[in-house]
Image (tube, rainbow, N blue to C red):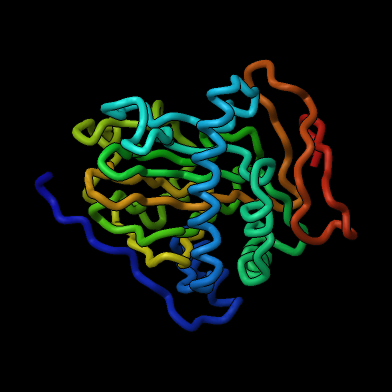
Amino acid sequence: MGFRIQQAYRFKRISGVEQRKVFFEEGYLIIENLLSSQEIEKCQNEIERLHLQCKEFLTQNDPRKNHFQMEPFREKPNCDDGLPILRKIEGTRDLSATFDQLAKHPSLVKTVQTLIGENLLLFRSTLMLKPAFHGSAHGLHQDSAYWPMEPPKLVTVSIAINDATTENGCFKIIPRSHKWGLREWGGIARRHDDPITDRNDVDPADQVEVPLKAGSALLFHSLMVHGSGANLSSKPRNTALYAYFSSDVRYKPRGGKSMQKTFPVIAGLNGKTELTLTSGES
């Protein structure tokens, strides 16, 4: 590649005020050991169950199969055990009580509230999967370039369900890139030998890697430029991904999408469980 990617700096043992300062200055924050070993095992088992469920949905042509996206660059249709080779599972809170509850993890919620306020809503609940030997790379991008929420100040959280390493495609970020403003990025899923970006004004050498032990989490601003490498290793890289926003963020649909959307309330808002937003209203 012609350059050596450094690793992200870990800010340890800092107060809530310092967390907020670091997050808005650097664009990211790492929480070590967010989950216990029991919680990690529960999530790992649930991912196995969801793969089995996907196979069942595909066999029965169940509409819920649309929650599951196949790995686009897989070299065979299924794993040797017959299970599908998945890239991601969207809307996990509708499929799994385990991942619905994980979005409300007390330590995580407290940290996100420190960053963006007491009233928290959930924009996205996803499992991002990089199956062993097949996991595609993710080109550099900003989440807010694809999300119909304004202003673009959501917090994305990626929780490692197993160890995320250089070899199996851990996150790569460009610190402080959330200050660049919103840009266009094109397609995200890429082959392992594709360029990480098509833009000529972004230097891949500015990336830093964010390896995480299982149970640790990366929080980053939705304008942070990030991506990840392909997984050509024998170990999967599975992460639970959530995106949170505060009650002053507006829903601005694009491309003929519905003018209203209902979002789960995670905390605050006088105990409401969900909130329906109309285009342009917060």
The residue most toward the top is: 256
Instruction: Looking at the picture, tell me which residue is in the foreground, 64 or 277.
Output: 64
x, y percent for residue 4: 15, 55
Residue 108, above or below 101: below
x, y percent for residue 115: 62, 64
The part of the image, by quadrant, that contains residue 140 is top left
x, y percent for residue 236: 34, 50
Residue 129, above or below 188: below
For the point 40% across and 59% down, the residue is 162
For the point 54% across and 43% down, the residue is 50
The residue most toward the left is: 2
Query: Split into 4 quadrants, where in the image is the N terminus?
Result: top left
For the point 47% across and 66% down, the residue is 215
x, y percent for residue 22: 49, 69
Residue 9, above or below 178: below
Query: Split into 4 quadrants, where in the image is the C terminus?
Result: top right
Q: Is residue 46 left or right of residue 235?
A: right
Q: Is residue 181 visible?
A: yes
